Amino acid sequence: MDLSESTLRDRARAYAETEPLYDVERQHVETVPKTFAGDEYGRRDAQWIVRWYFRRYLGEYPDRERREREEAFRDNEFDDVIDALDAAVDAVGVGGSEGGPADATEPDVAAALDALTALDGVDVAVASGFLQFLAPSRFVAVDRRTWEVLAAAGELDDPYPDPPSVADYRRFDEACRAVMDRTGVDAWTLYRALWRSFEEVPGEDS
């Protein structure tokens, strides 16, 4: 599995050209960091990320589990959601938009994940989706696709842990950072390239 800079950028461009959710994802990459760093956002802004995490599979994710997780998140008291997001924003800082620089302060990944996973319907994987949109130049959401591409490239040693723990996400994050440091791409570019590359993982059909 080739994860050179040229390959990553080519696959990220292919993602932008083919993935039906790309335009709305790009809008959220540009707006979510400032939205959640401020005080004027609603429940639906937070719900969008939970919905995105499952619905980007375009029907491939088990529908019953998706509905249960979305409903569980809707049942959280909104004040609790605000508190969790405030804690996550404080832990990771406000990230850049597509192509922008990552925050210079080293984020406290564990603190951000702990705050977010205290919410019903949010496990480490879904919490990583929040991190991706809170700091899109710095974080990549973890899932079977992104993990297995990194594993196929030799960046991770183990198969996807389902579900991933905080320690698993930290290893995944370290692998992503190593690729970003080597190639010069940001996390939003890397995410698109990894998602697009999944069909090339040996033994995977999609």
Image (tube, helix red, strand yellow):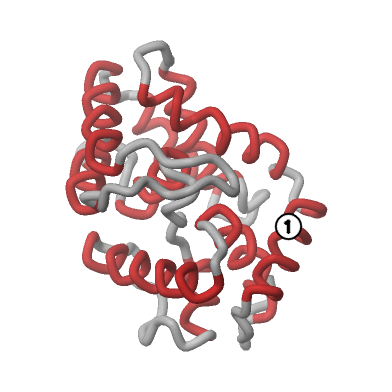
- Image quarter where the C terminus lies is bottom right
Q: Residue at x 24, y 44 (%)?
A: 112
Q: Residue at x 32, y 24 (%)?
A: 75
Query: In this picture, is 19 found above or below 116?
Result: below
Within-10-Å neighbours for mark 1: few <14, some 14–19, many 20+: many
In depth, the one of 63 and 104 nearer the eye is: 104
- Picture quadrant where residue 161 is located: bottom left
On the picture, is 21 further left or further right than 126? right
Helix, strand or loop status at disc 1: helix
On the picture, is 104 further left or further right than 154? left
Q: Which residue is mark 1?
A: 15
Q: Residue furthest top?
A: 40
Residue type for callout 1: Tyr
- Image quarter where the N terminus lies is bottom right
- Picture quadrant where residue 199 is located: bottom right
> In the image, residue 101 lies at what x, y percent?
48, 48
Q: Residue at x 49, y 76 (%)?
A: 182
On the picture, is 202 further left or further right than 40? right
